[in-house]
Image (spheres, grey):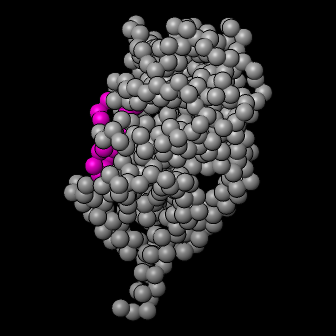
């Protein structure tokens, strides 16, 4: 091969990889998932083959945008594309780190465009097309013959080497679960569904301080001894009395679990943004009318699943979210993007300190599938004791759940929670996508007690 041909191949490879390297570097920088080679950039390069620089720039920016969205949604998940403007605004005002991300991405986008336009030569076209065809064949083989994992809409499939980020985006955003957020009509069914909070609907004012916790992905282990170890931090606490445990049967998603416990409602779809009626008998309304301060706490964004819209209708006077009130810019966990529950504990304690009569609802976050090991701050559950593989999803769930009950055991030591009625209940069974499932199907536990 002549020196000129070698240089053409080198330049062609540089063009291909510079189109991907920036976003890959951003994914490493932000601890998010991204494939190595996004084939969408090849389609932009076609315009350069025909010397159509303006069309190349426009198409490159479009491809870059969707590449960026896949990474961005892992940090700031969103359901509606219209929420993106709000999220981008929030990402630039919440932390200096996100400002640095934004400035760096815009600068590197411009440098990419300049570099590729100047480096591209007509003789590079054949080499780029050959590499493109190889990539397409590899991608086709992966799609048709490889075992694909179930990527979440906020966290794409892991271990992809070559793929289309545009197709990935459309695939994640068109999952059946998300499509329920575009349905119209009354979301509430006529039937009443009872949960762990049924007692509060009958006799609500059992204490001046009430704490209802919906614990994300808390399930009922097949081996009953496992649950006792998960609850051990609380069961061994001298600060609790009047303990009651039980199991409910439920099938659904987190919002279904929330409405079950807060309103005794069952839903036919999850488009609650425009749902105006049906919240009148929800627990927060009941307590608000009796003079209680009603507060909700959740470490994710308020617009996630329309919570910032329907929480006030359910009766919450004060809402604390990642982007509203929590003010924890240095707290970040990964199982579902948001603040860490062990940091939120202090904010919950503060609310009990400030209010003599309070109904506080805490929706936890860090035990969400896919049970990211980076969220494990305190490892006190022994999976080997129950012959569960250490990296199994069931194991990670149990470790994160035990950590949460350790966090809760510290919270109830606070003098400001003395006399508080506490109800902890799962939202749904833990989704286990890989490895042995150690949980009973459609069973969720609850645990209630009084702080002494």
* 402 in relation to 387, above or below: above
Residue 247 counted in the magenta span = no
* 332 in relation to 39, above or below: above
Q: Position of residue 357 (x, y in %)?
A: 72, 18
* Residue found at the far right of this picture: 354
The stretch in magenta equals 427-442
Q: Quadrant of the C terminus?
A: top right
Q: Is residue 339 visible?
A: no
Residue at left 63%, top 42%? 410
Q: Is residue 125 visible?
A: yes
Left or right: 176 in relation to 23: left
Left or right: 222 in relation to 81: left
* Residue found at the far bottom of this picture: 2
Chief SS of the magenta region: loop
Q: Tell me how many marks there are.
A: 0
> Which one is nearer the viewer's eye here, 230 or 361?
230
> Which one is nearer the viewer's eye here, 340 or 123?
340
* Residue found at the far left of this picture: 145
Q: Position of residue 302 (x, y in %)?
A: 61, 32
> Which one is nearer the viewer's eye here, 291 or 153?
291
> Which one is nearer the viewer's eye here, 19 or 311?
311
Residue at left 40%, top 40%? 227
Identify the image quadrant of residue 87.
top right
Q: Quadrant of the N terminus?
A: bottom left
* 173 in relation to 58, above or below: above
* Residue found at the far front of this picture: 238
* 226 in relation to 71, above or below: above
Residue at left 32%, top 29%? 442
Q: Position of residue 116 (x, y in %)?
A: 55, 69
Residue at left 41%, top 40%? 228
Q: Position of residue 33 (x, y in %)?
A: 47, 57
């Amino acid at each position: 091969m002549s020196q000129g041909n070698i240089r053409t191949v080198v330049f062609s490879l540089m063009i291909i990889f510079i189109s991907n390297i920036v976003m890959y570097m951003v994914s490493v920088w932000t601890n998010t998932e991204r494939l190595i080679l996004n084939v969408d950039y090849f389609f932009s390069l076609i315009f350069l083959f025909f010397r159509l620089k303006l069309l190349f720039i426009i198409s490159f920016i479009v491809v870059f945008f969707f590449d960026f969205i896949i990474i961005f949604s892992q940090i700031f998940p969103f359901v509606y594309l219209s929420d993106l403007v709000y999220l981008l605004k929030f990402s630039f005002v919440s932390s200096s780190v996100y400002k640095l991300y934004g400035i760096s991405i815009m600068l590197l986008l411009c440098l990419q465009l300049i570099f590729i336009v100047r480096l591209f030569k007509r003789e590079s076209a054949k080499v780029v097309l050959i590499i493109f065809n190889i990539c397409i064949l590899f991608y086709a083989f992966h799609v048709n013959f490889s075992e694909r994992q179930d990527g979440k809409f906020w966290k794409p499939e892991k271990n992809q080497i070559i793929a289309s980020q545009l197709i990935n985006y459309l695939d994640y955003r068109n999952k059946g679960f998300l499509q329920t957020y575009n349905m119209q009509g009354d979301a509430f069914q006529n039937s009443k569904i009872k949960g762990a909070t049924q007692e509060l609907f009958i006799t609500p004012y059992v204490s001046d301080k009430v704490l209802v916790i919906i614990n994300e992905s808390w399930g009922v282990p097949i081996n009953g001894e496992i649950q006792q170890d998960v609850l051990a931090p609380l069961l061994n606490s001298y600060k609790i009395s009047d303990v009651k445990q039980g199991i409910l049967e439920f099938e659904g998603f987190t919002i279904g679990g929330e409405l079950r416990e807060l309103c005794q409602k069952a839903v036919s779809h999850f488009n609650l943004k425009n749902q105006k009626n049906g919240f009148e008998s929800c627990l927060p309304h009941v307590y608000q009318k009796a003079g209680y301060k009603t507060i909700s706490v959740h470490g994710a964004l308020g617009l996630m699943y329309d919570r910032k819209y329907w929480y006030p209708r359910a009766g919450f006077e004060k809402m604390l979210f990642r982007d509203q009130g929590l003010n924890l810019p240095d707290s970040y966990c990964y199982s579902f993007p948001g603040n860490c529950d062990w940091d939120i504990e202090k904010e919950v304690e503060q609310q009990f300190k400030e209010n003599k009569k309070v109904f506080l609802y805490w929706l936890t976050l860090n035990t969400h599938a896919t049970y990211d090991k980076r969220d494990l701050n305190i490892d006190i559950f022994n999976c080997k004791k129950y012959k569960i593989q250490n990296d199994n999803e069931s194991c990670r769930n149990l470790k994160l759940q035990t950590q949460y009950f350790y966090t809760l055991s510290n919270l109830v030591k606070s003098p400001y929670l003395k006399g508080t009625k506490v109800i902890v209940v799962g939202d749904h069974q833990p989704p286990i996508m890989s490895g042995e499932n150690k949980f009973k199907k459609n069973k969720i536990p609850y645990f209630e007690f009084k702080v002494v």
